[in-house]
Image: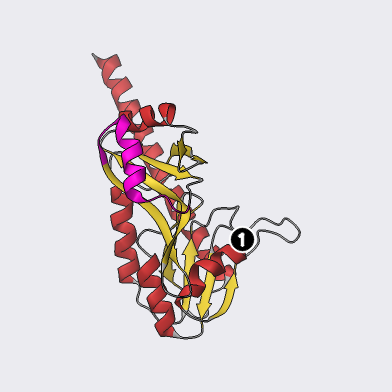
Amino acid sequence: TVPGSTLFIKNLNFSTTEEKLQETFTKCGVVRSCSISKKKDKSGKFLSMGYGFVQYQTAEAAQKALRQLQHCTVDNHQLEVKISERATRTAEVSRKKKQVEKKQTSSKILVRNVPFQATVKEIRELFCTFGELKTVRLPKKAAGSGKHRGFAFVDFLTKQDAKKAFAALCHSTHLYGRRLVLEWADSEETVETLRRKTAEHFHVAAKKQRKTEILGGILDTMETEEGVAD
């Protein structure tokens, strides 16, 4: 995927089709793919969630569409258009690899990259079509702050239902324009263990950053000394 070549389209009419959306956005350049996010209703029928993605061949075409098609009307709905925050292909491949590596050990799914405006109700609606849910938790940052930490725990009644939901939603599910990242949670995984893991990850990353800066400083010094010697 070319960075900056994918648009996030909001406020779609629920009856708008992917064909209609593609037809509208082809006016600004070659469209590589066009998708409308959908969810299953209780009868198993897929329904539009009112937003979608248009991926162009070039970032320039996406910028052109952003200028020319912002607030354009499709099926009596005025569209909101912005550049999507979708991850690059490399990040996507490594994420899928990690998902495959961690095997299912429980009926609990850890959902990362949850947008801050998302609610427990919306997370529940997304997952409840696949089976009965035991709990849906969206841990808060601090008491009284009202803000959540950007991840959720979704626990199904059975491992089979959890597996169905994971398979259906792990590759390309978006909420408010952000791609949800699904992992299998250990049954005893808590906010505390997750916080510790995240802290360890940042500690390692910071150490690597410091090492790079020190090496860079040494190289700069060597170059300066060589310049003086010349």
* Camera sees residue 3: no
Q: Please, what is the three-letter code of the amino acid marked with disc 1?
A: Thr
Residue 32 in magenta stretch: no
Q: Is residue 32 left or right of residue 4?
A: left
> Could you tell me residue 172's position as x and y percent?
37, 58
**In front here: 185 or 38?**
38
User: Dot 1, how many residues are within 10 Å of its Cα: few (below 14), some (14-19), or many (20+)?
Assistant: some
- Residue on which the image places disc 1: 119
Instruction: Please give the name of the residue rendered at 31% of the width and 70% of the height, measured from the top-left corner.
Output: 101
> Could you tell me residue 157's position as x and y percent?
51, 85
Q: Which residues are the magenta region? A: 14-31
Q: Is residue 37 left or right of residue 121?
A: left
Where, by quadrant of the figure, is residue 100 drawn?
Answer: bottom left
Position of residue 39 relative to residue 16, above or below, is below
Instruction: Please give the name of the residue rendered at 23% of the width and 13% of the height, measured from the top-left corner.
Output: 230
Where is the N terminus found, in terms of image quarters?
top left
**In front here: 162 or 53?**
53
Q: Is residue 216 left or right of residue 109?
A: left
* Camera sees residue 184: yes
Position of residue 15 relative to residue 6, above or below, is below
Tell me which secondary structure the magenta stretch mostly adopts. Answer: helix
